[in-house]
Image (cartoon, rainbow, N blue to C red):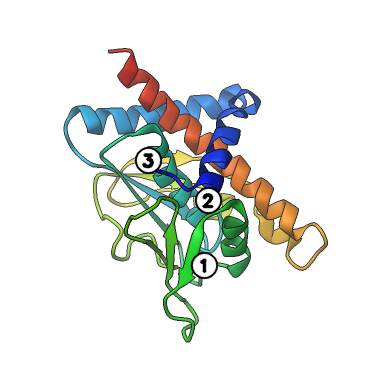
Amino acid sequence: MLLSEVSTFCTSLISQFSVISTARKERLQQLADFILTKIKAREKAKLIVICTHNSRRSHIGQICLAVAADYFGIKGIDTFSGGTEATAFNPRAVRALRDIGFQIETADTATDNPRYLIRWKEDTLPYFAFSKRYDEPPNPTRDFAAIMVCSEADQGCPVVLGSALRLSLPFDDPKAFDDTPEEQKAYREAIERIGRELFYAVHLVKKAGQAK
């Protein structure tokens, strides 16, 4: 069962589907089709969310996809994230996820790239998050969907080797509001924007399954 605050947040995301543009919904349908194809073939749907530094949007996207799969009860979705370079999971994004209701612990605070243990359900093993290149372990190297969530990575990686689907889905970077009075609001809105679109894609998978 999802943690209460996280479940409430998920319900809020679903209520926002109507604000997603038609063009974005068409792209998200491509992601849903990829997931459905894999599920029907009894294969894992491996999804890597990619941005330049693997510090904000890609982590948020990976976590939102994993939560959406749990929320809608979709088995067979494995989520990952990576960058064109590795830095660290930005503490502002970590704090924003905590504010929503995620339980997050830091496993190794002494490093420049700490590992975070994230939970959104009761009595489950933690979800590990740390910064890495998109082609580094534990990320898959073939037959995955590459979801490009920032323009820089999208332009810098016209081809993502090993991907079966490359989907351009850029979002504004909340980094623009770091150390300003709008910082907290900007990060919350970034999670909502990314979350509602990725939840919409997984919702389409659920809907297709119910239509059988």
Q: Give the residue at the far bottom of this rendering.
A: 110
Relative vertical location of residue 162 with respect to residue 7 in this rendering, above or below? below
Relative vertical location of residue 77 with respect to residue 24 in this rendering, above or below? below
What distance separates the C-alpha of mark 1 from that of mark 2? 22 Å
The crowding category of the residue bearing disc 2, from other C-alpha atoms within 10 Å (few below 14, some 14 to 19, many at least 20), is few
| Secondary structure state at the residue bearing disc 1 | loop
Sequence-first tag of 1 and 3: 3
| Secondary structure state at the residue bearing disc 3 | helix
Question: On the image, numbered disc 3 is attached to which residue?
Answer: 70
Decide which of 18, 103 is in the foreground and name it: 103
Res. 54 visible in picture: no
Q: Which mark is residue 89?
A: 1
Q: Position of residue 37 (x, y in %)?
A: 26, 28
Q: Give the residue at the far top of this rendering.
A: 211
Image quadrant where residue 131 sits: bottom left
Sequence-first tag of 1 and 2: 1
Question: On the image, numbered disc 2 is attached to which residue?
Answer: 155
Looking at the image, residue 24 sits to the left or right of residue 49; the answer is right
The crowding category of the residue bearing disc 1, from other C-alpha atoms within 10 Å (few below 14, some 14 to 19, many at least 20), is many
Res. 201 visible in picture: yes
Decide which of 105, 26 is in the foreground and name it: 105
| Residue type, label 2 | Gln
Image quadrant where residue 147 sits: top left
Decide which of 124, 173 is in the foreground and name it: 124
Relative vertical location of residue 30 with respect to residue 78 in this rendering, above or below? above
Q: Marks 3 and 2: which is nearer the front?
A: 3
The crowding category of the residue bearing disc 3, from other C-alpha atoms within 10 Å (few below 14, some 14 to 19, many at least 20), is some
